[in-house]
């Protein structure tokens, strides 16, 4: 008996909806990262991109536990000398809550070609409506 090895043509992709309302950002991000990689499938292999599409709703209602709203910072460098920009998560949560979830998921996906294509299948929305109704996404319980 030989081991089953999936090919790129045999992979089928589904759409899943995650609701982040009242749930910690890290818990939502770990579930989303596992679905994007395809780790929930029995045919998962590390060398192929076999993940599914993920839609995350209610990003503004997601929760950061502890004192992370005031003590955690999002930092990025512009490339110029002395231009390290930083924004605390309370400000970022009020202005752009989608970015917080995208950054959390991005940190849990490998930094490879497969990881970058997996992040292209992630869609995060601030409120409870999404534009992918035609794909008939299934709800995923967290």
Image (cartoon, helix red, strand yellow):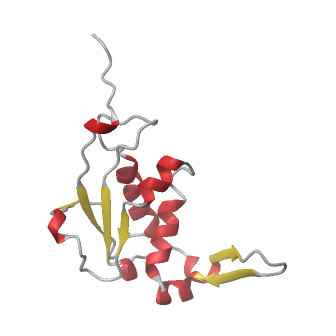
Q: How many marks?
A: 0
Judged left or right of residue 118, residue 139 is left
Judged left or right of residue 125, residue 66 is right
Question: Measured along the vertical axis of the image, is residue 19 above or below residue 40?
Answer: below
Q: Position of residue 2 (x, y in %)?
A: 31, 13
In the image, what residue occupies the spot 84% across and 78% down?
81
Judged left or right of residue 56, residue 129 is left
In the image, what residue occupies the spot 37% across and 56% down?
31
Most extreme residue toward the right is 81
- For the residue pair 71 and 29, the one nearer the viewer reads as 29
- For the residue pair 46 and 68, the one nearer the viewer reads as 46
In the image, what residue occupies the spot 40% across and 34% down?
45
Residue 10 seen: yes
Q: Position of residue 26 (x, y in %)?
A: 46, 64
Image quarter in which the C terminus is found: bottom left
Q: Position of residue 60 (x, y in %)?
A: 39, 82
Name the image quarter holding residue 101.
Answer: bottom left
In the image, what residue occupies the spot 35% across and 43% down?
50
- For the residue pair 90 and 78, the one nearer the viewer reads as 78
Residue 64 seen: no
Most extreme residue toward the front is 9
Q: Position of residue 66 (x, y in %)?
A: 54, 74
Question: Measured along the vertical axis of the image, is residue 7 above or below residue 133?
Answer: above
Name the image quarter holding residue 118.
Answer: bottom left
């Amino acid at each position: 008996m030989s081991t089953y090895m999936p090919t790129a043509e045999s992979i089928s992709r589904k759409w899943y909806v995650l609701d982040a309302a009242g749930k910690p950002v890290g818990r939502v991000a770990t579930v989303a990262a596992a679905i994007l990689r395809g780790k929930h499938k029995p045919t998962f292999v590390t060398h192929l991109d076999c993940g599914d599409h993920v839609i995350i709703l209610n990003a503004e209602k997601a929760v950061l536990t502890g004192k992370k709203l005031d003590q955690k910072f999002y930092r990025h460098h512009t490339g110029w000398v002395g231009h390290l920009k930083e924004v605390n998560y309370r400000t970022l949560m009020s202005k752009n809550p989608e970015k917080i979830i995208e950054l959390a998921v991005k940190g849990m996906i490998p930094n490879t070609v497969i990881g970058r294509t997996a992040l292209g299948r992630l869609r995060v929305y601030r409120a409870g409506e999404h534009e992918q109704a035609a794909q008939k996404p299934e709800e995923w319980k967290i």
